[in-house]
Amino acid sequence: MAKVTANIPVQKNQSIELEITGQGHEGEGVGRYEGFTIFVPGAIKGERVKAKIVKVQKSFAYGRLMDLLHPSHHRTEPSCPIYHRCGGCHLQHMTYEGQLEHKRQMVIDSLTRIGKLENVPVHPTLGMDVPWEYRNKSQVPVGLVNGKIVTGFYAPRTHEIIDMEGCPIQHPYSDEIVNKVKRALENLNIPPYDEASKKGLVRHIVARVGYHTDETMVVLITNGRKIPKVEELIQRLRGEIPHLVSIIQNVNTAVTNVIFGPDTITLWGKDTIEDRIDDIRFSISARSFFQVNPIQTKVLYGKALEYAQLTGEETVIDAYCGIGTISLFLAKKAKQVIGVEVVKEAIDDAKRNAALNGITNAEFLVGEAEKVIPDLYEKRGLKADVVVVDPPRKGCDEALLQTIADMQPERVVYVSCNPSTLARDLRYLEDRGYKTQEVQPVDMFPQTKHVECVIGMQRIDT
Ligand code: SAH
């Protein structure tokens, strides 16, 4: 069937000149050609570009950036030599100032378009002094290319591993750890996993670093239990890897893109590493979620604490609490904190972390926030003064938002990693007696497209 192209002003392979007037969620430039939306990856708002149309859809097209006719003052040279091949970063071609402005704009756009929230103050994004080397966890696939072990990243949309010596947004220890493990595997002839034949052993190397403690952990994800020459491997890694306190094996024999499998074994040392956020200590196991940017986490939680306006008398619910990071951060300033999280191991960590810090006014419950919190309200009659939510990208379940509206806490603090679902959820609460007072974007993931923010909401008497 012939394609209907009547209202589409561009065709594949056509070259056009375009004014870039916005920036999309993936960091791509957006412009309009005779009213038709064109996405141009790599282009920056304010630029005039020459683009070649590579893909045409019903209501938009993609163009490849061919020429910069008028570059933005926010354009800069990406500092990573493999930036264009890797796909892990999206904004290295933008100055850091430009990135921070772009992220704030993403939040404003979602709040106005999706949330219909017009006059909410959205503060300038809080960025890092040095927006590099911040990640405390690195997970790299291991493979064999032309008989040599490679560790790096999957080329976008493929299963081909591109070898990489270092990554400028990772803590330098992580690169060192991965490279040392790789050499050790080579020297001891421990075979990497081969995706095509499903044979071989080592699938991924995971390195974790305690930013404030310097402790490091190596996790080997293996396609089977037995590692040949495991004692030699352990001795070698202990001798070579700085500040190593833990070597973990995780067995994953499934044909899957999910990195971790069900069995975790400590091969040597501790089961966990320790890190701190401010003066609170956290013990982190191989599989636990811990914020990847420890410097900005303190900034993020500091804002959450500020918006919670605690006096010491409040009961606080921390929904989606992970290993209890926000809960413990708030516990010192509240009467009582109840953390709710669906992953049991994370709740075990949260309880251990409370004990580690001598915090006795925090309680942790396993289960879905949208089930546990309605139960707490309906069956236990619990009424919180402040509810903090920090959901995954899909946002809060409606049952949880409904319970918040019924429970009527004085304040809601929303920590969000996705402005679209955030805007949807804020609108829901705005329609049920809450007012969004302040929005603070915090740059947790410099050089990437990810946007994080904290929001303070107040109940208004109706
Ligand atoms: N507040 C924590 C974790 C935030 S990440 C921190 O700052 O470290 C979001 C968390 O929500 C994850 O730990 C995930 O396991 C959890 N989660 C996902 N769906 C959930 C649900 N329906 N109910 C409760 N927790 C959930």
Image: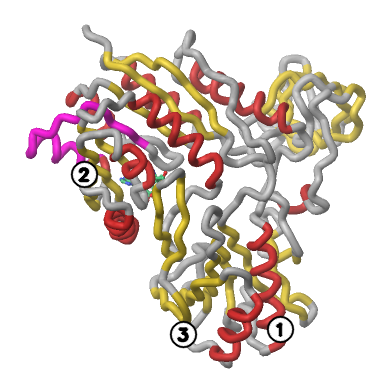
Please tell me which residue is depicted at 71% across the width and 56% down the height of the picture: 167
Say which residue appears at 43% left-offset and 77% top-offset: 266
Label 2 or label 3, whichever lies nearer to me, is 2
Packing grade of label 2 (10 A; few <14, some 14-19, many >=20) is: some
Secondary structure under tag 2 reads loop
Residue range (magenta): 370-389
Q: Is mark 3 within 8 Å of ligand 1?
A: no
Secondary structure beneath label 3: loop
Q: At label 3, which amino acid type do we have? A: Arg
The spot of residue 219 in percent (x, y) is 52, 71
Q: Nearer the viewer, mark 2 or mark 1?
A: 2
Q: Is residue 379 magenta?
A: yes
Q: Is mark 1 within 8 Å of ligand 1?
A: no
Residue type at mark 2 is Asn
Disc 1 + disc 3, Cβ < 8 Å: no
Mark 2 or 3, nearer chain start: 3
Looking at the image, residue 427 lies above or below residue 289? above
Q: Which residue is mark 1?
A: 186
225 relative to 37, above or below: below
Q: Is residue 41 left or right of residue 408?
A: right
Q: Which mark is residue 225?
A: 3
In percent of width and height, residue 418 lies at: 49, 34
Looking at the rendered structure, which numbered label has been put on residue 361? 2
Three-letter amino acid code of the residue under disc 1: Glu
Q: Is residue 413 magenta?
A: no
